[in-house]
Amino acid sequence: MNKEYIVKCIKELPNEVANDLLYYIKYLRSISPKKEENNKGFSFDWEGSLSELADQYTSMGLQHKAMEWR
């Protein structure tokens, strides 16, 4: 299905439903994820942030500590 077909179907609708259709379109746009948000990927800018604690904690120790903080 392409956008031209959708436009054709919209043009065939009675004018009375135009407001309902516009409301629904706005709703769909509000719940649809933005394209740029989908293409961000993962950020690893936090990597190495706890390196100064490496001699005090193991990775398992840090996991246990994080569970205490929750």
Image (cartoon, rainbow, N blue to C red):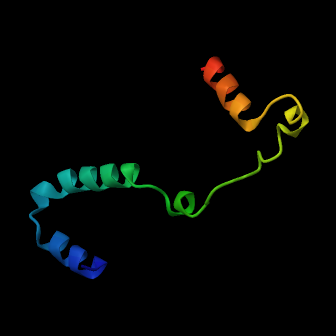
Task: State the residue at coordinates (83%, 45%).
Answer: 48
Taking the spot 27% from the left edge, 81% from the top edge, the residue there is 4
Q: Is residue 46 left or right of residue 54?
A: left
Determine whether 22 is above or below 52 in the image. Answer: below
Q: Is residue 28 above or below residue 8?
A: above
Return the x and y of residue 57 as percentages of the image width and height.
Answer: 81, 30
The count of marks equals 0
Residue under the image location 77 percent in, 50 percent down: 45
Instruction: Give how far across and how far down residue 41 sits, in percent.
Output: 61, 60
The quarter of the rendered structure image containing the C terminus is: top right
- Judged left or right of residue 9, residue 66 is right
Task: Say left or right for 50 vs 3.
Answer: right
Residue 23 place in picture, x, y as percent: 26, 49
Which quarter shows the N terminus? bottom left
**Residue 58 position by quadrant:** top right
> Is residue 15 or residue 52 the one in the foreground?
52
Q: Residue at x 72, y 52 (%)?
A: 44
Corner quadrant of residue 50: top right
Q: Picture coordinates of residue 69 (x, y %)? A: 65, 19
